[in-house]
Structures are given as C-alpha cells and as structure tokens.
Image: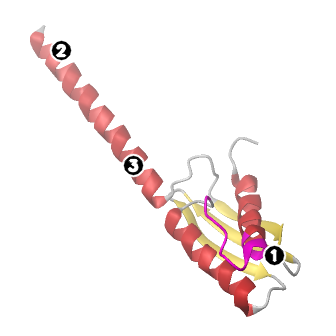
Amino acid sequence: MKRKNGKTLALALCFAALIYSCLSQNSSVGLNLGYRPGIYEGSGQAYRGPVHVRVQITPSGIEDIEITDHREGFFPGLAAMEELLDLVLIEGNTDLDAVSGATVSSRGFLDAVNDALDKARLAQ
C-alpha cells in the first residue's frame, strides 16, 4: 500500500510541476490559450485616422503583427506604434502603457491589435 501511495504522490507532483512549468512558460512567451491560430485583421482609431493591423497567431502565441494601413506621420505616431508592435511581440499581450507624446496613436494601435485578437478568440 505504501508503494502505491508513493507512486501516486510522485505522479501528482510531476503533474503539478508540469502544469506550473506550462503556466509560467505561457505567461513569459505570451501563449494565448483562448485564441485560434491564424491571421486576423483589426482596426482602431489613431490620432490622424484609422489604423489597420494584421496579427498572426500560432499555438505558441502572437507570432507577428503588421501595420497594414495608417495615416500617422513617422514621428511621433508611427514611431510609437512600431515601438508598441515590438513590445506586444515580446510581452505576448497588449497590456501596455501608451507611448508618451503619442497617446492617441498608441491607443489606436493597441485597439486595432485587440480587435484582431477578439476575432481570434475561441469562445465566440
């Protein structure tokens, strides 16, 4: 009986370690369990007009983001959006602050990415 309990405990600990590893890995690489892999388009309202993005989702998270259309000048609007694009890819989510001096452009870009992510949600 002791041997069975020991195996059960060992199996439970291995399972718990696996779950913890997956959860910590997912948050660090941005794995989005609620998103269906594919390419999704989204839009938001930036300072000078609409901004459109194309977001590629893979099983491991947000793989790529492309700004497909915008009316922002390079500085500060487009520069802020490009900075946020890199941060979203690194962080794996859009829970970011706006870039100072380009708040509306930043919010428009993040709204566009969120719009694309909403389209990728599994539970619709």
Name the residue at 74% across, 61% down. 116
Give me the C-alpha separation between circle 2 and circle 3: 28 Å
Q: Residues within 10 Å of mark 3 (few under 14, many from 20)?
A: few
Three-letter code for the amino acid on which mark 2 is drawn? Asn
Judged by its main secondary structure, the magenta piece is loop
Q: Is residue 102 magenta?
A: yes
What residue span does the magenta drawing correspond to? 95-106
Measured as percent of width and height from the top left, residue 111 is found at: 76, 63
Q: Nearer the viewer, mark 2 or mark 1?
A: 1
Is residue 29 shown above or below 83?
Answer: above
- Which residue appears farthest toward the top when viewing the image? 1
Name the residue at 74% across, 71% down. 109
Q: Is residue 117 left or right of residue 14?
A: right
- Which residue appears farthest toward the bottom when viewing the image? 74
Q: Which mark is residue 5?
A: 2
The first of marks 1 and 3 along the sequence is 3
Name the residue at 78% across, 91% down. 73
Three-letter code for the amino acid on which mark 3 is drawn? Ser
Regarding mark 1 in the picture, which secondary structure is present there?
A: strand
Q: Is residue 26 magenta?
A: no
Q: Is residue 5 left or right of residue 116?
A: left
Regarding mark 3 in the picture, which secondary structure is present there?
A: helix
Q: Which mark is residue 24?
A: 3
Three-letter code for the amino acid on which mark 1 is drawn? Val
Q: Which mark is residue 51?
A: 1
Give me the C-alpha separation between circle 2 and circle 1: 59 Å
Is 40 or 110 nearer to us in this picture?
Answer: 110
Measured as percent of width and height from the top left, residue 80 is found at: 67, 80
